[in-house]
Amino acid sequence: MMVTWKAITNAQLIDGNGGPVVADATVLVRDQLIHAVGTGIEIPPEAETIDAAGRTVMPGLVEGHAHVGGNPEAIQTLRLSLQRGITTVCSVSANRDGIQLRDGINAGQVRGCARLIAGCVVCPTHGHVKFRTADGPWEVRKAVREMTDMGADFIKTAASGGFWSANESCSVRNYTLEELDALVDEAHAWGVPVVVHAHTQPGIGNSIQAGVDQIHHGAFIDEAGVRGILEAGLHYMPTLRVTSDRNIAAWPDRPWMLEEMRKAQPIHRAGVRLAHELGVKIALGTDYPGSAKGWLVGDATPWELVELRDCGLLPMEVLVAATRTTAEAYRKLDRFGTLEPGKFADLLIVDGDPLADLRVLYDETKIALVMKEGEVEHVTDLYRDHYRIGIDQPTSRYRITG
């Protein structure tokens, strides 16, 4: 079988590990994988060379909290995500259809899409999240077994209410500690992590005590919650976009949401600042792809970068959160999240310096080239003459309609 080589040369390299930037670096790709990274690398004469002089090479972004199933709109969302530099999307509600789409993407039957990491929801009756309803420890265990048998990469549940419904609030408890204990024990027995939606106490504390792997949101997180996450070594994915001014403005027809989001906004950000100061492992997720109004597909993830920066993270810390830490949270760091030999060649060439201004990653025209698993999947005019992309690319971004 013929080996294919690609060499990205003359780049400013951000490898995702948080170390110093490497100037005039080379990333050598063999087939799907990174073969070598750094300076002084010998390039095979048959390698295709991509000149990145004056530009930045970095890992593809990993979106850690998405709602992408398996319908045709999901394919469009994943294709547009890839164009924005998001090479992996972790869907907390992929469920059965999303698992099928994941497998189709991995098999090469659905092309030009971001990688999909597929989660399945196990939820209580009248719970905030919906899919496989299960009440009581033994029914919860059965539900987890069903979802892992289906092929779930992880289990998603809720320990508190949320903003969405008029008949709930963030402070409403969902699963009890007894049920969370059963869910986590069963999921871990089958080797899959647990992601929990939790905005407030007692849900945050119950989740920590049960031993979940990731806590998402925490819009009303308190100091005890932050310190508990730290002491337990969990990953915290704050999804700050949800309580941003822009997102609040997107829901004029849902006044109960606006009221609670406005109350949460300063508390949410104070919690993330404390988490950063204490050294909590912060990952990146956004409730992707967006709301019914005010967001286009691909907007949320780069928007979250700036939200994290505004909570005190340095630009390099933000990029690590959006790549390495999120991959680590889903137990996929051995495959992607950093630019290191042996990992998938998921990378971006950025026309600019994200460390000088993270907003460059929000500008889709600055994502000069996107590579996923060694294949160039998207280019802007900077590389248009060099590449003719085989997959039909969506011609425009679009709004989420529901």
Image: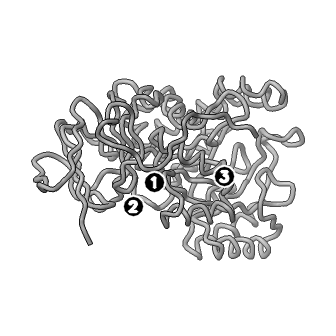
Of marks 3 and 1, the one in the foreground: 3
Sequence order check, earlier mark of 3 and 2: 3
Residue type, mark 3 in image: Pro
Sequence order check, earlier mark of 3 and 1: 3
Residue appearing at x 28%, y 55% in the figure: 340
On the rendered structure, is 379 left or right of 101?
left
Q: Residue 74 at x, y = what percent?
A: 63, 50
Closer to the camera in the image, 185 or 250: 250
Disc 1 is placed on an element classified as helix
The residue identified by callout 3 is 72
Cα distance in 3D space between marks 1 and 2: 8 Å
Q: Residue 96 at x, y = what percent?
A: 69, 65
Tell me where residue 344 sits by quadrant: bottom left
The residue identified by callout 2 is 335
Q: Report the disc number at residue 327.
A: 1
On the rendered structure, is 188 left or right of 2?
right
